Image (cartoon, rainbow, N blue to C red):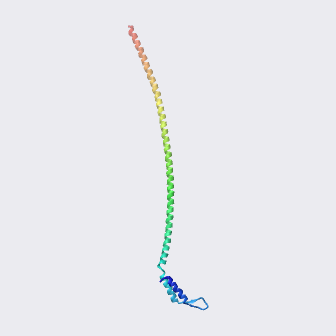
Amino acid sequence: MEIQHLVDRLESLLNESWLIPLTSNRIISEEEFLDIIDQMRITIPEGIKQAKRIQQERERIIAQAQEEAERIVTLAREQATSITDEHEVLKTAETKAEAILRQGQQEAEDVKAGADDYVIEVLSELEEHLMVFLTTVRNGLKAVQRDKGRREVASDNQTHQF
């Protein structure tokens, strides 16, 4: 039976009931009234019960979806923060690497300049020593050649004297 039909039967039962004089009260058949109520309870469409279950399931799904959305938003924020932090760390590392590279290049240039200065100093000292040695050698050669020349002259003089 349809619920509308049962509501109509209740209305008919009320209209067919006896009015108590001087009041708005009516006398109806309790047995018929309870029978219609029982039939109404039995005939409540399954759709209404199902709609209630669907409404409860919908509320549960919405709550679950909101929780998931909040979790995703939180995770996205954490990832964004992490990416930002990683980007900052990367930029800092790149800046430090560039500074270290510049410092290394400067130190290499300083070492090269120091090495060049050292080589110039050592070679200059060596040149001075060689010049002193060369002068000593030349003086020695001149002295030996002078002495040899004197001995030859003396020897020639002695050979001519006899």
Q: In this view, does 92 lie above or below 70?
A: above
Q: Image quadrant of residue 15? A: bottom right
Q: State left or right for residue 10 relative to residue 159.
A: right
Say if 26 sits above or below 145 in the image.
below
Quarter of the picture holding the C terminus: top left
Q: Which of 92 and 72 is in front in this view?
A: 72
Q: Which of 70 and 121 is in front in this view?
A: 70
Residue 117 x %, y %: 49, 34
Q: Residue at x 54, y 86 (%)?
A: 11
The outermost residue toward the right is 22
Q: Position of residue 135 (x, y in %)?
A: 46, 23
Identify which residue, 138 or 71, lies in the foreground. 71
Image coordinates for residue 138, horizontal then vertical, percent: 44, 22
Which residue: 50% across, 60% down?
76
**Above-or-below relation of 90 to 6:** above
How many marks do you count on the picture?
A: 0
The single residue placed furthest to the bottom in the displayed view is 21
Q: Who's the residue at 39% across and 11% down the image?
A: 156
- The percent coordinates of residue 85 (x first, y second) are 51, 55
